Image: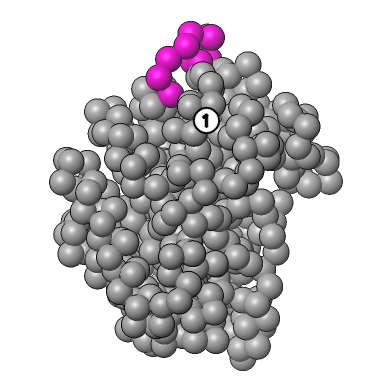
Amino acid sequence: MRRRSVLTAASAAALAVPALAAAPAVASTGTAGTAGGAPDRRRLEIRGMDISSLPKDEASGAVYRRADGRRDDPVRILADAGVTHARLKVWVNPADGYNNKEHILPLARRLRRAGIGIWVDFHYSDTWTDPSHQAKPAAWTDLDVPGLTRAVYDHTADVLGALRRQGTPAGLVQIGNEINGGMLWPEGDYNHWADLAGFLKAGLTAARDTTPRVRTILHLANGGDNGLYRWWFDNAVSYGVDFDIIGLSYYPFWHGPLADAAANMADITARYGKPCVIAETAYPFTLKSEDATNDILYDPSQLTAGYPATPEGQAAWIRAVADLAAGVPGGQGLGHCYWEGVWTYRAGDGWDPADPTSGNAWENLALFDFTDRALPGLKTLGRYRA
């Protein structure tokens, strides 16, 4: 995820495929209970948070406090709240020097000591990737397809191998981030599925070669779009791409109602015989902004009915997403991950890695408030369905 942009080329491709059969109906994602009247107490294995911004935020002066105001190590706060996994994005050669191997290794040691699992998210770029942006790293610009394939393998193996050697192996790894339209454009875009499949296989092979017990994830955005997911994963399977988990981004303000996401998750887990995880979600605790940058969520029209932009509304949304994951038939919903819950506002830690003056458009969706205190949603994330 980055400053959200709409799906472009991939949506056109998804619309071009033949009409698909309707996804199966699914039960409500609420907590009222099962058909027999018993309460649904299904536990979620993954109750995670993307904390990629943490090293840069701390270097910029960020502090984190427990709900009672006591200052503490944010990793310890997350562990005590019950967070099971921390997701860490990896760029190749970012302009600001963060979100790379050098910063992930010490953060992984902190996570290991706290008992939090490590989830690595490879972007295969020097900056943000999403459905509309999949730029190759500058150092890979002149590589041909075989060269890019080798670069994907080497980069993936380098990072994951370093994690394993220091005793902090990744438990989960994403090969690409929101790759609706492919990655490493243009060679690996959706018009070149054979080459895209080769890049994916290189990353998957590197992950398994360096970390044999790791579980691999292929991750798309637009979690309520069943047509997109069928088109994309039908192609991946037809090219022999072997993965373990389907990852979805699901934000209600971009990706439609809960019912659409529930139907999609029920369909794709049955169709491909793979479990799924909601790899990204978030919700605002306020529509106010702490800095001069316009926030992504700022208007009441962007909110989902029944979930106000309050600390309580944010926590309620996290419960709804947990119920969504728990409601996938056959126990095939592994859990969910809150995106950048520690990305509080500090000057110098903005959106653009090449511009230290850029602002933060996300701070009103963090799980720490403008006084740096943990919000109720953090405890909900870690403890609900634990």
Name the residue rendered at 30%, 30% in the picture. Answer: 110
Name the residue rendered at 63%, 67% in the picture. Answer: 132
The residue positioned farthest toward the bottom in the image shown: 18
Find out whether residue 68 is within the magenta segment.
Answer: yes
Q: Nearer the viewer, residue 170 or 245?
A: 170
Dominant SS of magenta comes to: loop
The location of residue 172, given as percent across then percent down, is 31, 53
The location of residue 6, given as percent across then percent down, is 70, 64
Q: Nearer the viewer, residue 181 or 266?
A: 181
**Magenta part of the protein: which range?**
65-74
Can residue 30 be spotted in the picture?
no
Q: In this figure, what is the number of numbered marks?
A: 1
Q: Secondary structure at mark 1?
A: helix
Image height check: is 236 above or below 379? below
Q: Is residue 260 left or right of residue 46?
A: right
Image height check: is 20 above or below 136? below
Crowdedness near tag 1: few (<14), some (14–19) or many (≥20) residues, C-alpha within 10 Å:
many
The location of residue 123, given as percent across then percent down, is 46, 59
> In the rendered structure, which amino acid carries the disc numbered 1?
Asp
Find out whether residue 307 is within the magenta segment.
Answer: no
Image height check: is 154 above or below 309? below
Query: In which quadrant will I find the C terminus?
Result: top left
Name the residue rendered at 73%, 44% in the picture. Answer: 296
- Model colouring: one colour
Query: In which quadrant will I find the N terminus?
Result: bottom right
Residue named by callout 1:
57
Name the residue rendered at 48%, 72% in the picture. Answer: 141
Can residue 131 be spotted in the picture?
yes
The location of residue 208, given as percent across then percent down, is 21, 64
Image quarter of residue 244: bottom left
